[in-house]
Amino acid sequence: MFLSYFDESGDDGYPQMSSELFVLANLYMHESNWKRNYEGMHGIRKMLKAKYGLNVSQEFHTKEFITDKNPYHGLFTPQQRKEMLFDYCRGLATLNFKLVTVCINKRGINRPEYEVLEKALTYSVQRIENDLTVMGDDARFMIITDEGRVAAMRRTTRMIQKINYVPSMLDGTPIRKDIKKLIEDPLSKNSKDSYFIQAADLLAFIMQLYCKTRLCNPKIEWGKRIKNVLAEEDLLSLLAILKPIFNLKASYKNEYGVVFYPK
Protein backbone atom coordinates (compact mmCIF):
# COMPACT_ATOMS: atom_id res chain seq x y z
CA MET A 1 0.00 0.00 0.00
CA PHE A 2 1.20 3.50 -0.89
CA LEU A 3 0.13 6.67 0.89
CA SER A 4 -0.13 9.78 -1.26
CA TYR A 5 -0.23 13.28 0.27
CA PHE A 6 -1.43 16.24 -1.80
CA ASP A 7 -1.20 20.00 -1.48
CA GLU A 8 -1.13 22.92 -3.89
CA SER A 9 0.28 26.35 -4.60
CA GLY A 10 -1.92 28.92 -6.31
CA ASP A 11 -5.67 28.81 -6.78
CA ASP A 12 -7.64 26.51 -9.06
CA GLY A 13 -10.08 29.18 -10.26
CA TYR A 14 -10.73 29.79 -13.96
CA PRO A 15 -11.57 32.06 -15.71
CA GLN A 16 -11.78 34.09 -12.47
CA MET A 17 -8.45 33.62 -10.74
CA SER A 18 -6.02 35.03 -8.23
CA SER A 19 -2.97 33.23 -9.65
CA GLU A 20 -1.85 32.46 -13.19
CA LEU A 21 -0.51 29.03 -12.22
CA PHE A 22 -1.95 26.17 -10.23
CA VAL A 23 0.63 23.68 -8.99
CA LEU A 24 -0.40 20.39 -7.41
CA ALA A 25 2.27 18.46 -5.51
CA ASN A 26 1.84 14.78 -4.75
CA LEU A 27 4.21 13.18 -2.25
CA TYR A 28 3.82 9.40 -2.02
CA MET A 29 5.51 6.54 -0.20
CA HIS A 30 5.12 2.85 0.55
CA GLU A 31 3.51 2.16 3.91
CA SER A 32 6.66 0.35 5.06
CA ASN A 33 8.56 3.65 4.79
CA TRP A 34 5.96 5.77 6.57
CA LYS A 35 7.33 5.43 10.11
CA ARG A 36 10.92 6.19 9.13
CA ASN A 37 9.79 9.11 6.98
CA TYR A 38 7.69 10.46 9.83
CA GLU A 39 10.61 10.22 12.21
CA GLY A 40 12.77 11.95 9.60
CA MET A 41 10.21 14.75 9.28
CA HIS A 42 10.10 15.13 13.04
CA GLY A 43 13.89 15.25 13.07
CA ILE A 44 13.85 18.08 10.50
CA ARG A 45 11.49 20.08 12.67
CA LYS A 46 13.60 19.48 15.79
CA MET A 47 16.64 20.70 13.88
CA LEU A 48 14.79 23.86 12.78
CA LYS A 49 13.76 24.40 16.40
CA ALA A 50 17.31 24.02 17.68
CA LYS A 51 18.90 26.25 15.02
CA TYR A 52 16.24 28.91 14.49
CA GLY A 53 13.61 28.61 17.21
CA LEU A 54 10.74 27.46 14.97
CA ASN A 55 8.34 25.51 17.19
CA VAL A 56 8.19 21.81 16.30
CA SER A 57 4.38 21.74 16.40
CA GLN A 58 3.82 24.99 14.48
CA GLU A 59 2.30 24.49 11.04
CA PHE A 60 4.69 25.42 8.24
CA HIS A 61 2.98 27.54 5.57
CA THR A 62 5.74 28.06 3.01
CA LYS A 63 4.39 31.10 1.15
CA GLU A 64 3.65 33.01 4.35
CA PHE A 65 7.02 31.99 5.78
CA ILE A 66 9.05 33.11 2.76
CA THR A 67 7.11 36.36 2.33
CA ASP A 68 7.39 37.26 6.04
CA LYS A 69 3.66 37.24 6.74
CA ASN A 70 1.79 36.12 9.85
CA PRO A 71 2.35 34.04 11.88
CA TYR A 72 6.07 34.43 11.03
CA HIS A 73 6.23 38.19 10.52
CA GLY A 74 9.35 39.72 12.01
CA LEU A 75 10.65 36.47 13.52
CA PHE A 76 13.40 35.71 11.01
CA THR A 77 15.70 37.73 8.75
CA PRO A 78 15.63 37.10 4.97
CA GLN A 79 18.95 35.24 5.27
CA GLN A 80 17.56 33.02 8.04
CA ARG A 81 14.46 32.24 5.99
CA LYS A 82 16.64 31.19 3.06
CA GLU A 83 18.87 29.05 5.26
CA MET A 84 15.84 27.41 6.89
CA LEU A 85 14.37 26.58 3.49
CA PHE A 86 17.65 24.99 2.39
CA ASP A 87 17.92 23.01 5.64
CA TYR A 88 14.34 21.80 5.24
CA CYS A 89 14.97 20.67 1.66
CA ARG A 90 18.21 18.92 2.53
CA GLY A 91 16.28 16.92 5.11
CA LEU A 92 13.48 16.05 2.69
CA ALA A 93 15.99 14.80 0.11
CA THR A 94 17.15 12.08 2.53
CA LEU A 95 13.69 10.56 2.97
CA ASN A 96 12.17 7.67 1.06
CA PHE A 97 9.29 9.02 -1.00
CA LYS A 98 8.61 10.34 -4.48
CA LEU A 99 7.18 13.60 -5.76
CA VAL A 100 4.96 14.27 -8.76
CA THR A 101 4.37 17.90 -9.70
CA VAL A 102 1.61 19.04 -12.05
CA CYS A 103 1.42 22.66 -13.18
CA ILE A 104 -1.61 24.11 -14.95
CA ASN A 105 -0.68 27.31 -16.80
CA LYS A 106 -3.93 29.22 -17.05
CA ARG A 107 -2.42 31.64 -19.54
CA GLY A 108 -2.30 28.77 -22.03
CA ILE A 109 -5.96 27.78 -21.71
CA ASN A 110 -7.83 28.60 -24.92
CA ARG A 111 -11.39 27.64 -24.07
CA PRO A 112 -13.97 29.33 -21.82
CA GLU A 113 -14.41 26.39 -19.43
CA TYR A 114 -11.55 24.41 -17.93
CA GLU A 115 -11.66 22.40 -14.70
CA VAL A 116 -8.21 23.22 -13.34
CA LEU A 117 -8.23 21.00 -10.24
CA GLU A 118 -9.83 18.11 -12.12
CA LYS A 119 -7.16 18.21 -14.81
CA ALA A 120 -4.26 18.56 -12.37
CA LEU A 121 -5.49 15.76 -10.12
CA THR A 122 -6.17 13.44 -13.06
CA TYR A 123 -2.66 13.95 -14.45
CA SER A 124 -1.14 13.40 -11.02
CA VAL A 125 -3.11 10.26 -10.19
CA GLN A 126 -2.28 8.84 -13.61
CA ARG A 127 1.44 9.20 -12.85
CA ILE A 128 1.11 7.27 -9.58
CA GLU A 129 -0.88 4.62 -11.42
CA ASN A 130 1.86 4.32 -14.03
CA ASP A 131 4.55 4.02 -11.36
CA LEU A 132 2.69 1.37 -9.37
CA THR A 133 1.70 -0.64 -12.43
CA VAL A 134 5.29 -1.80 -12.95
CA MET A 135 5.40 -2.96 -9.31
CA GLY A 136 2.81 -5.68 -9.81
CA ASP A 137 -0.89 -6.31 -9.37
CA ASP A 138 -0.86 -5.93 -5.58
CA ALA A 139 0.43 -2.34 -5.50
CA ARG A 140 -2.34 0.04 -4.41
CA PHE A 141 -2.52 3.62 -3.16
CA MET A 142 -4.78 5.98 -1.27
CA ILE A 143 -4.96 9.78 -1.18
CA ILE A 144 -4.69 12.00 1.89
CA THR A 145 -5.29 15.71 1.41
CA ASP A 146 -6.04 18.93 3.26
CA GLU A 147 -9.70 19.49 4.00
CA GLY A 148 -10.39 22.35 1.59
CA ARG A 149 -10.74 20.52 -1.74
CA VAL A 150 -11.63 16.98 -0.69
CA ALA A 151 -15.17 17.05 -2.14
CA ALA A 152 -13.97 18.14 -5.60
CA MET A 153 -11.15 15.60 -5.48
CA ARG A 154 -13.64 12.88 -4.56
CA ARG A 155 -15.74 13.63 -7.64
CA THR A 156 -12.69 13.49 -9.90
CA THR A 157 -11.23 10.28 -8.52
CA ARG A 158 -14.57 8.50 -8.71
CA MET A 159 -14.91 9.60 -12.34
CA ILE A 160 -11.45 8.50 -13.51
CA GLN A 161 -11.84 5.09 -11.87
CA LYS A 162 -14.86 4.54 -14.14
CA ILE A 163 -13.53 6.05 -17.35
CA ASN A 164 -10.24 7.77 -18.16
CA TYR A 165 -8.59 8.50 -21.48
CA VAL A 166 -4.92 9.35 -21.97
CA PRO A 167 -3.11 10.29 -25.19
CA SER A 168 -1.05 7.58 -26.85
CA MET A 169 2.71 8.19 -26.66
CA LEU A 170 2.94 7.17 -30.30
CA ASP A 171 0.51 9.49 -32.05
CA GLY A 172 -1.50 11.24 -29.34
CA THR A 173 -4.66 9.26 -30.07
CA PRO A 174 -6.76 8.94 -26.88
CA ILE A 175 -6.70 5.46 -25.37
CA ARG A 176 -8.79 4.28 -22.44
CA LYS A 177 -6.80 3.74 -19.26
CA ASP A 178 -9.10 3.73 -16.24
CA ILE A 179 -7.52 4.13 -12.81
CA LYS A 180 -7.36 0.70 -11.14
CA LYS A 181 -4.95 1.02 -8.22
CA LEU A 182 -6.59 3.77 -6.22
CA ILE A 183 -8.63 2.61 -3.21
CA GLU A 184 -11.14 4.62 -1.17
CA ASP A 185 -12.16 8.21 -1.69
CA PRO A 186 -9.57 10.89 -0.88
CA LEU A 187 -9.36 11.18 2.89
CA SER A 188 -9.10 14.59 4.54
CA LYS A 189 -6.61 15.57 7.22
CA ASN A 190 -5.97 19.00 8.64
CA SER A 191 -2.59 20.15 7.34
CA LYS A 192 -1.56 21.37 10.79
CA ASP A 193 -1.59 17.74 11.90
CA SER A 194 0.45 16.38 8.98
CA TYR A 195 4.14 16.96 8.36
CA PHE A 196 3.66 15.31 4.96
CA ILE A 197 0.96 17.69 3.74
CA GLN A 198 3.10 20.59 4.96
CA ALA A 199 6.03 19.16 2.99
CA ALA A 200 3.81 18.89 -0.10
CA ASP A 201 2.92 22.56 0.42
CA LEU A 202 6.62 23.48 0.51
CA LEU A 203 7.40 21.47 -2.60
CA ALA A 204 4.42 22.90 -4.49
CA PHE A 205 5.60 26.43 -3.68
CA ILE A 206 9.17 25.75 -4.84
CA MET A 207 7.97 24.11 -8.04
CA GLN A 208 5.63 27.03 -8.73
CA LEU A 209 8.63 29.38 -8.59
CA TYR A 210 10.43 27.10 -11.04
CA CYS A 211 7.49 26.98 -13.44
CA LYS A 212 7.11 30.75 -13.39
CA THR A 213 10.67 31.47 -14.47
CA ARG A 214 11.69 28.38 -16.44
CA LEU A 215 8.58 26.94 -18.08
CA CYS A 216 6.32 29.93 -18.71
CA ASN A 217 6.88 32.01 -21.83
CA PRO A 218 6.97 34.86 -21.14
CA LYS A 219 8.12 34.13 -17.63
CA ILE A 220 6.17 35.30 -14.59
CA GLU A 221 8.15 37.51 -12.23
CA TRP A 222 8.34 36.60 -8.56
CA GLY A 223 7.02 39.06 -6.02
CA LYS A 224 9.39 41.45 -4.29
CA ARG A 225 9.01 39.68 -0.93
CA ILE A 226 10.16 36.41 -2.50
CA LYS A 227 13.11 38.11 -4.21
CA ASN A 228 14.17 39.44 -0.81
CA VAL A 229 14.85 35.82 0.18
CA LEU A 230 15.61 33.85 -2.98
CA ALA A 231 17.36 34.44 -6.28
CA GLU A 232 16.93 32.20 -9.32
CA GLU A 233 20.35 30.69 -8.58
CA ASP A 234 19.05 29.68 -5.14
CA LEU A 235 16.04 28.01 -6.74
CA LEU A 236 18.27 25.93 -9.01
CA SER A 237 20.34 24.90 -6.00
CA LEU A 238 17.17 23.81 -4.18
CA LEU A 239 16.07 21.77 -7.19
CA ALA A 240 19.46 20.06 -7.34
CA ILE A 241 19.12 19.15 -3.65
CA LEU A 242 15.59 17.81 -4.12
CA LYS A 243 16.14 15.95 -7.39
CA PRO A 244 16.60 12.52 -5.71
CA ILE A 245 12.94 12.55 -4.62
CA PHE A 246 11.44 13.65 -7.97
CA ASN A 247 9.60 11.07 -10.06
CA LEU A 248 11.49 11.91 -13.23
CA LYS A 249 9.37 9.47 -15.25
CA ALA A 250 6.28 11.59 -14.65
CA SER A 251 7.33 13.70 -17.65
CA TYR A 252 10.26 12.80 -19.85
CA LYS A 253 10.09 16.28 -21.38
CA ASN A 254 11.24 17.99 -18.18
CA GLU A 255 14.46 17.41 -16.25
CA TYR A 256 12.56 17.44 -12.95
CA GLY A 257 9.58 15.41 -14.16
CA VAL A 258 7.19 18.37 -14.04
CA VAL A 259 3.89 17.75 -15.85
CA PHE A 260 3.06 21.09 -17.50
CA TYR A 261 -0.29 21.79 -19.20
CA PRO A 262 -1.68 23.09 -21.48
CA LYS A 263 1.17 22.23 -23.80
Image (cartoon, rainbow, N blue to C red):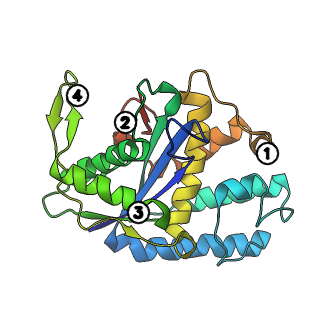
Q: Residue 108 placed where, x, y %?
A: 48, 25
Q: Quadrant of residue 29?
A: bottom left
Amino acid, disc 4: Met
Q: Nearer the viewer, mark 1 or mark 3?
A: 3
Name the residue carrying label 3.
Answer: 150
Secondary structure of the residue carrying numbered label 4: loop
How far is disc 2 from disc 4 in space, using C-alphas?
12 Å
Question: x and y percent of residue 181 in the render?
Answer: 20, 58
Which three-letter amino acid code belongs to the residue tagged 1? Answer: Arg
Disc marking residue 225: 1
Amino acid type of the residue that numbered disc 2 sits on in the rendered structure = Ser
Residue to which mark 4 is pinned: 169
The image quadrant that residue 4 belongs to is bottom left
- Distance from the alpha carbon under mark 1 to that under mark 2: 31 Å
Q: Who comes first in sequence, dot 2 or dot 4?
A: 4
Category of crowding for the residue at label 4, using alpha-carbon neighbours closer than 10 angstroms: few (below 14), some (14–19), many (at least 20): few
The image quadrant where one finds the N terminus is bottom left
